[in-house]
Amino acid sequence: MKRVMVSAAIVASMLAAAAPLAAQADWDSNAFWRGAPAKAWGRMGFLQQRIDRGIRDGSLDRREAWRVQKELRNIRDDAWRMRRRDGDKLNPGDAAALQARLDDLSRRIHWLRHNAW
């Protein structure tokens, strides 16, 4: 019984986390990245600016900003580990994986900044 309850809680939390992303099926990532650098490192800086701007203008509250900042820090840390592993370069597979994570994070930031309660 306990396993069923834990499993149900995990499924519910996964669905709740996916709701903002599903609500943005029409979201245009190209429009979001317009004016941003093409490489992952530059895009991390671009997202940091978006987070900072959201904090300044109040479109991100403290908890939201903390969550997306933490995720960006995790992406940055993973990117450093990938670079060190491969001789101070990102291989194409790692670069694509990082870009996918940055796209997900950018969607989340966009959703949080434009869908406040």
Image (tube, rainbow, N blue to C red):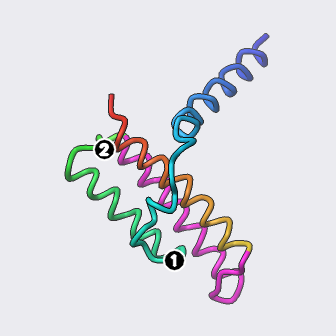
Q: Tag 1, which secondary structure?
A: loop
Q: Looking at the picture, does residue 66 appear above or below residue 116? A: below
Q: Tag 2, which secondary structure?
A: loop
Q: Which residue is mark 2?
A: 60
Judge the density around disc 2: few (<14), some (14-19), many (≥20) Cα neighbours within 10 Å.
many
Quarter of the image for residue 8 reads top right
Q: Looking at the picture, does residue 74 appear above or below residue 7? A: below
Quarter holding the C terminus is top left
Amino acid carrying label 2: it is Leu
- Number of marks in picture: 2
Q: Position of residue 26 (x, y in %)?
A: 54, 44
The mark found on residue 38 in the picture is 1
Identity of the residue drawn at 67% across and 69% down? 96
* Distance from the alpha carbon under mark 1 to that under mark 2: 25 Å
- Does the magenta stretch mainly form a helix, a strand or a loop? helix
The earlier-in-sequence mark between 1 and 2 is: 1
| Segment colored magenta | 64-92
Quarter of the image for residue 15 reads top right
Q: Position of residue 73 (x, y in %)?
A: 48, 61
Quarter holding the N terminus is top right
Q: Is residue 102 left or right of residue 54?
A: right
